Image (cartoon, helix red, strand yellow):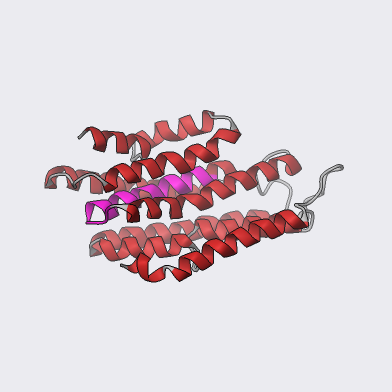
Amino acid sequence: MIALLLALVLLPLFPLSLLFNAGLQALPVWMRVPALLALPAAGALLLGQTAAPPAPLATALQIFAAFTTLLYAWRLLAVQEVFIWARLQATSAWPLVWLAWLHGMSGVALVLVALAVTLPAAVLMILGCSLSRRLGGAYLGLRGRIGPAFPRLTGVWVVALLAALAAPPFPGFFAMIAVLQQIPAGLVAVVLAVWLLWSWAAAVLLQHGLFGDEWPRAAGTVDLSRSGTALWLALAAAVVLGSIGGWSWWMH
């Protein structure tokens, strides 16, 4: 029971997710990314080594997990600030780890699912820092599209956003398929609804960042360097190829 309570703190469901998000927001920006990755992974590791609870508690956890993932997916639709969008999307994704665990997934698979659905949010937070330095903030849609002023940074941001909504062939896609294979039909409908809401929210954010009048580039600001862009895209390609290469393991 202690392990289960600790997992609820590290991999929070509503209402503990409110405290987790408040704490994450209060951290300095340079600490948010390590916390965002390490804490849910530790929670998934704990779950993977813990037996599923009795039926009444398992049912309650399922209800809270389904409510949490839908709630935060819905909240994404009203968010235009990249830091907030990233942590809310991750908070919406973590209950999927609980649902998979409650229906038999265990061990390393749970940790990989947690990392697969959290890593894009961490990358978005890093890119949010780049946007803040150039735009004065990571809030999109205030003064038009950012692509003409910062085409390379915008391209990397679009790739990270596609990864966050678990589009193929990013790791989140394989994690979602693995979770869908594990859970019953009623929860499948919930997860598919969440996936749809993520796509809708990402489309809204893309609209704010890619359409409208051109954002005027402030004096002294420069685009992401070519070497930096190449490094980001090479890392994305390596992760994608690793996911595709291990697709049969994800499906197991």
Name the outermost residue toward the right.
Answer: 219
Q: Which quadrant would residue 42 be assigned to in this image?
A: top left
Predominant SS along the magenta part? helix
Q: Which residues are magenta?
A: 85-106
Q: Residue at x 27, y 53 (%)?
A: 106
- Depicted 89 relative to depicted 173: above or below: above
Q: What residue do we see at 75% from left, 56% from top?
A: 227
Question: Where residue 243 sits in the image (x, y, percent)?
Answer: 47, 65
Task: Say whether residue 128 is left or right of residue 215.
Answer: left
- Residue 29 coordinates in the image, percent (x, y): 59, 34
Residue for point 52% across, 49% down: 121
The residue drawn where x is 33% and y is 51% is 97
Position of the N terminus, as image quadrant, is top left
Question: Closer to the camera, 238 or 190?
Answer: 238
Indicate the position of residue 164 as horizontal and vertical percent values: 51, 56
Residue 165 visible within the image: yes
Q: Tell me, yes or no, whether the highlighted magenta stretch contains residue 91.
A: yes
Q: Taking 12 as reference, is 103 left or right? A: left
